[in-house]
Image (cartoon, coloured by chain):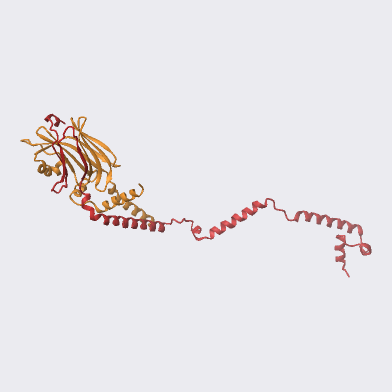
Chain colours: A red, B orange
């Protein structure tokens, strides 16, 4: 057995029919007032449907991109290096790199230094690699090489038999 | 912040410590007339260190410069001329070797080449070449490597073995250069 309210709601929704409809409308005290109320209720229903319907999103790709970017940003912010706002070349790392490079330089330098010690003495002396006197002017000239016995370590290229020249050639 | 200061101090110290290693060097080349005179003139300052050696070797009491040239070597590939009125000493540097600078020397009398020599001129060992007899004297060619900067240090270096760090560095530099040839 439906209550009056249930029948009223069904009547407003036009879900009553046949004998049930005739009996309900006959039971109404003022059918015209009820019909006016029914029209208002239907108009209100249509209005609410229009206003409260879910708005459809346009540009789905744009929103999807925005969301992905936001997720990526949040993921990056979670990593410890990004969180501090620094690069891989932090000052302690720079110091360690510098110290390592310096150590390598010193090791290599002293390694080469050690290799050189055995031949150290010969490097100090000037060496004559080749010497040639003009054979036309001085056909009998000879050349010899020696080092002075003094502390200056002078290397001497000694020529003999070069053509003598007059004193005028000593001019500045 | 203190770490940055320490880093800066280390860099500064390294830069100042390595600077003398790269000091430029000058080759002094000279034409000298040696002769015996009753009242010899003072020896030129550049030859002061060699005075005793020259006197012992050649037996003259006066050494007079008739031409000279100071050439600062930057690449080791430079060439230059020391001239007098009649003689010219052309020096052509052809790079560095273990013993010093490799030089090609040509002694000209006006346009004629009297003598040509290839030598490896050491920083610590001057080269003296006996040239022709000129009048009653003797023409000598003298070549000396000297540092441009820190003259006092230069003098000490000639009396003692070379700076071992510098020697090691030069050897390392040549080895690295050799790798890229």
Residue A68 picture quarter: bottom right
Placement of A147 over or under B107, stated as above or below: below
Q: Position of residue B43 (x, y in %)?
A: 12, 39
Residue A67 picture quarter: bottom right
Query: Measuring 59% from the left and 54% from the top, which residue is drawn there?
Result: A69
**Residue found at the far left of this picture:** B38
Q: Nearer the viewer, residue A127 or A28?
A: A127
Q: Position of residue B4 (x, y in %)?
A: 38, 55
- Left or right position of B7 against B92: right
Residue A4 picture quarter: bottom right
Placement of B32 over or under A151, stated as above or below: above
Query: Measuring 57% from the left and 58% from the top, which residue is drawn there?
Result: A74
Q: Quadrant of the C terminus of chain A?
A: top left
Query: Measuring 11% from the left and 30% from the top, which residue is drawn there?
Result: A167
Placement of B90 over or under B175, stated as above or below: above
Q: Nearer the viewer, residue B39 or A81?
A: B39
Q: Position of residue B11 (x, y in %)?
A: 34, 52
């Amino acid at each position: 057995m439906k209550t009056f309210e249930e029948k009223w709601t069904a009547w407003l929704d036009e879900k009553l029919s046949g004998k049930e409809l005739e009996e309900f409308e006959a039971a109404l005290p003022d059918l015209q007032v009820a019909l006016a109320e029914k029209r208002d209720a239907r108009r209100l229903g249509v209005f609410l449907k229009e206003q409260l319907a879910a708005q459809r999103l346009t540009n789905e790709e744009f929103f999807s991109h925005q969301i992905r970017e936001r997720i990526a940003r949040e993921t990056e912010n979670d990593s410890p290096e990004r969180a501090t706002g620094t690069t891989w070349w932090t000052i302690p790392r720079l110091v360690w790199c510098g110290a390592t490079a310096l150590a390598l330089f010193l090791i290599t330098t002293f390694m080469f230094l050690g290799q050189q010690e055995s031949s150290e003495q010969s490097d100090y002396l000037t060496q004559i690699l080749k010497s040639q006197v003009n054979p036309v002017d001085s056909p009998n000239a000879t050349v010899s090489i020696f080092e002075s016995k003094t502390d200056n370590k002078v290397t001497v290229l000694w020529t003999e038999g070069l053509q003598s020249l007059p004193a005028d050639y000593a001019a500045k | 912040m203190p770490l940055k200061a320490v880093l800066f101090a280390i860099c500064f110290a390294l830069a100042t410590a390595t600077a003398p290693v790269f000091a430029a060097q000058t080759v002094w080349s000279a034409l000298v007339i040696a002769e015996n005179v009753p009242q010899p003139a003072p020896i030129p300052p550049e030859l002061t260190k060699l005075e005793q050696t020259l006197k012992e070797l050649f037996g003259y009491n006066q050494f007079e410069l008739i031409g000279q040239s100071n050439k600062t070597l930057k690449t080791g590939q430079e060439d230059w001329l020391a001239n007098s009125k009649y003689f010219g000493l052309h020096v052509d540097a052809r790079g560095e070797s273990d013993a010093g600078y490799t030089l090609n020397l040509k002694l000209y009398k006006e346009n004629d080449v009297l003598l040509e020599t290839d030598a490896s001129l050491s920083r610590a060992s001057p080269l003296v070449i006996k040239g022709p007899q000129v009048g009653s004297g003797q023409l000598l060619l003298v070549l000396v490597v000297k540092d441009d900067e820190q003259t006092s240090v230069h003098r000490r270096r000639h009396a003692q073995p070379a700076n071992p760090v510098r020697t090691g560095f030069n050897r390392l530099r040549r080895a690295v250069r050799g790798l890229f040839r």
